[in-house]
Image: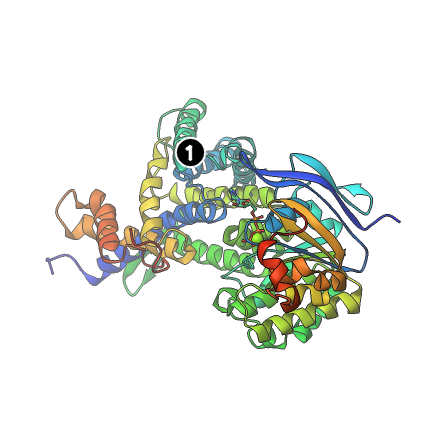
Amino acid sequence: MSHLMEVRNIETYYGPTMAIRGVSFDVSQGQIVTILGANGAGKTTILKTISGIMDPQKGSVSFEGRDIQRMDPDRVVRLGISLVPEGRELFPFLSVRENLQLGAYTRHDHKAVASDLERVFEYFPSLKMRASGPAGMLSGGEQQMVAIGRALMARPKVILLDEPSLGLSPKLVKEIFEIIVRINRDSGTTIVLVEQNANVALQVAHFGYILEMGRIVMADTGPALLEKDDVREFYLGIKDKGVRGVRRWKKRKTWR
Amino acid sequence: MHGGRSMAEFLQLLVNGLAVGCIYGLVALGFVLIYKAGEVVNFAQGEMMMLGAFVAFTFIVQFGLNYWIGLALAVVVMAAFGGLLDIVVVRRIIGQPQFSTVMLTIGLGVMMRSGASMVWGPETRGLPSPFDKTVLQIDGVVLSAVYLAILVTTALLCVFLLGFFRFTRVGLAMQAASQNQLAAYCMGIPVKRVLSSVWALSAGVATIAGVMLAPISLIDPNTGAIGLKAFAAAVIGGFGSIPGAVVGGILIGLIELFSGVYLPEGFKDTAAYIVLLAVLVVRPQGLFGAVGRKKV
Ligand SMILES: Nc1ncnc2c1ncn2[C@@H]1O[C@H](COP(=O)(O)OP(=O)(O)OP(=O)(O)O)[C@@H](O)[C@H]1O
Ligand SMILES: [Mg+2]
């Protein structure tokens, strides 16, 4: 079976610094796939490479059987891949409604765009009240909602989410993740979710990858990763009491 | 008040100052549009105005076309020129240090100036306007329709631009690209093409300014030098604020004309910069600028 998106051996640089050191992974149609990693692991760089903001030096990204590495971002989004960038990146002086409408910039089916706008307001009711205010005046959580809504407005086949939980209260994180699951269930939208918050991400992900220093070091289904000792210890901060004595002298990750 | 200085003269000065200020304001608006969209300061903006006036001169005087048709053609030709300038030259140095873009646009201005004197000669030219002969008398105050037409045109142009930015797809895309270029790219907005359209738009606006200026102050290849005053206007307005640019222009126009009449010789030409200094000392961010950028 071929996957909706296949990333093969990409290497991406910032000047002379190699940020991604040959990463490969697959994304299947309709799934939520998560990539977990600590600060500086290269998560954002992977999403930038897929969405065309950065070009990989080597390797390929194929989407629906077509090579998209080195394509410009405005063409990638037209193929059906929308990015919700790290730090939201809204248009601060435009209204919330205008921000959302710009998400549908590539579309010309005005009626459907209008009904999708209603759908976004239904997912995020608190945005409706602030629809005519400038997006720059929203709280961090509301801005994250606008960023997700704006990506939805393109009716993408894949949404790339870069740390949606960043800086949000646990309650808001829960709410946002419920919406992410709903988006995935309601319209079968495939989701690539990059996170540091392994706990929430693995709760919702069908499949997960663990990224360290620009390399994928582990891959498994969401539930399986949740059960793995290394993941529990290093990403969830849970230490199993029973093996503590053994762990003390053997405190290293098994994949190294 | 001095003997002959009457209310009528004051009103005339007011209208004339407003009109000249509108022209500064429109050129300043061009600076701001290009700066906001692409972070390039186009020091050739005054020269674009000058070229626009000469192109209109060719259509209207040399080819003998109808004034409005000639004006429309000049705007189209100059818009194409502005867009091409971005595509062929400016776009290539995006990402280089600010100094390179500054030098580049200054160089472009010099080239436009010498190009104009090669094509149209160094002498001054007039451009007739359909409002030349019309004079309005209100309560004994004689107002030239040329000046009033400038006010009306500027007002209409501002309303048009406002509507364009708020309600059209391209206008919204321009705003998006100027607020967050990366995000605009990710929305599928062809940012490069949008930036070129901004150049086209500000060249078109500059052309209208030039055509309005021509009847009140003959044009020659050095007319573009008022770009410097327009630049001061843009800074006064907060460089980045579109209403600020127009208000800054009007402020300079008014102060210039009034100081020419009520103040000793010599103040007229420095007035713009005295105002600029005063504004920058009192409100470093400009009249309409955002507060709290950088402390050092
Ligand atoms: N603009 C840049 N210039 C140079 N190096 C960079 C730049 N951005 C990121 N890097 C480097 O690339 C590596 C990967 O960065 P990336 O932003 O992809 O990490 P991340 O996993 O998204 O981290 P975080 O969780 O903090 O967002 C890091 O080592 C970082 O130092
Ligand atoms: Mg990141």
The residue singled out by tag 1 in the image is B105
The local crowd at label 1, few if under 14, some if 14 to 19, many if 20 or more residues have their Cα within 10 Å, is some
Residue pushed farthest right?
A: A1
Question: B57 and A23: which one is in front?
Answer: A23
- Secondary element under disc 1, as helix, strand or loop, is helix
Residue pushed farthest top?
A: B118
Residue B5: which quarter of the image?
bottom left
Subunit ID for the residue under disc 1: B
Q: Where is residue B193 in the image (x, y as percent from the top left)?
A: 60, 42
Question: A5 and B233: which one is in front?
Answer: A5
Q: Is mark 1 within 8 Å of ligand 1?
A: no
Question: A47 and A234: which one is in front?
Answer: A234
Q: Where is residue A197 in the image (x, y as percent from the top left)?
A: 61, 63
Q: Residue at x 35, y 35 (%)?
A: B223
Q: Where is residue B177 in the image (x, y as percent from the top left)?
A: 55, 50
Can residue B288 be seen from the camera position used here?
yes
Can residue B188 be seen from the camera position used here?
no
Residue A224: which quarter of the image?
bottom right
Residue flagged by tag 1: what amino acid is it? Thr
On screen, residue B198 above or below A178: above
Q: In this view, does A42 lie to the left or right of A205?
A: left
Q: In this view, does A29 lie to the left or right of B102?
A: right
Q: Which residue is drawn at 16% across and 53% down?
A: B262
Question: A217 and A134: which one is in front?
Answer: A217
On screen, residue B77 above or below A80: above
Q: Is residue B25 left or right of residue B171?
A: left
Q: Where is residue A29 in the image (x, y as percent from the top left)?
A: 81, 56
